[in-house]
Image (cartoon, helix red, strand yellow):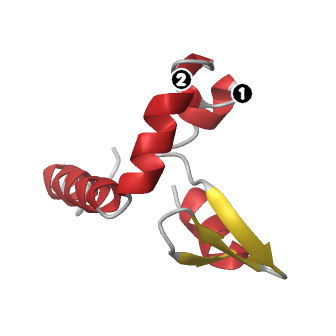
Amino acid sequence: MPAPSLIDHARVRELKQREDARFHAARPLSLALWQRAQAVMPNGVPMAWHRSSYHHLPLWVSEGLGARFTDLDAYLVAWRELLEALTAG
């Protein structure tokens, strides 16, 4: 018999929903571009797996240098941080 889980799944869902809402609110330009893209591409992205790989707005890159890039809403992202976030579970 497996040990009972110590993880509060309801709390995890609550935190995820809160962080997704914060992510969306902080990226108005990305939201506008994604909505515009939905008129010409299924799900607003060039490949179906892009939309099903994560549950927040797609990242729209405005410029990059080395292992870092800046998204359309002026957030600096390091590739390592992005890969860690995408593979965290």
Residue 76: where, in percent of width, then height?
Answer: 57, 79
Whole-percent x and y of residue 85? 54, 65
Instruction: Answer few, some or many: residues within 10 Å of disc 1's Cα (few below 14, many 20 plus, some between 14 and 19).
Output: few
Q: How far across and how far down the image is residue 44, in percent? A: 56, 28
Are the residues at dot 2 and dot 1 in contact (C-beta closer than 8 Å)? no
Residue, x 50% and y 75% (percent of image)?
75
Q: Which mark is residue 47?
A: 1
Quarter assignment of residue 48 = top right
Counting other residues with Cα less than 10 Å from the Cα at mark 2, is it few (<14), some (14-19), or many (20 or more)?
some
Q: Amino acid at mark 1?
A: Met
Q: Is residue 13 visible?
A: yes
Query: Is residue 60 toward the left or the right of residue 38 in the image?
Result: right
Spot the residue most to the right: 66
Residue at position x 22%, y 63% from top? 6
Is 39 placed left or right of 2 in the picture? right
What quarter of the picture does the N terminus occupy? Answer: top left
- Work out whether 8 lies above or below 69: above
Give the residue drawn at x 54%, y 46%.
Answer: 58
Q: What is the secondary structure assignment of the residue under circle 1?
A: loop
Q: Position of residue 50 (x, y in %)?
A: 64, 36
Q: CA distance from mark 2 to mark 1?
A: 9 Å
Labelled disc at residue 9: none
Identify the amino acid type marked 2. Asn
Q: Circle 2 is placed at which residue position?
A: 43
In the image, residue 27 above or below residue 75: above
Q: Secondary structure at mark 2?
A: helix
Residue located 56% across and 29% down the image:
37
Against 26, residue 76 (above or below) is: below
Q: Can residue 52 be seen at all in this image of the molecule?
A: no
Please state which of residues 53 and 3 is positioned toward the viewer in this rendering: 53
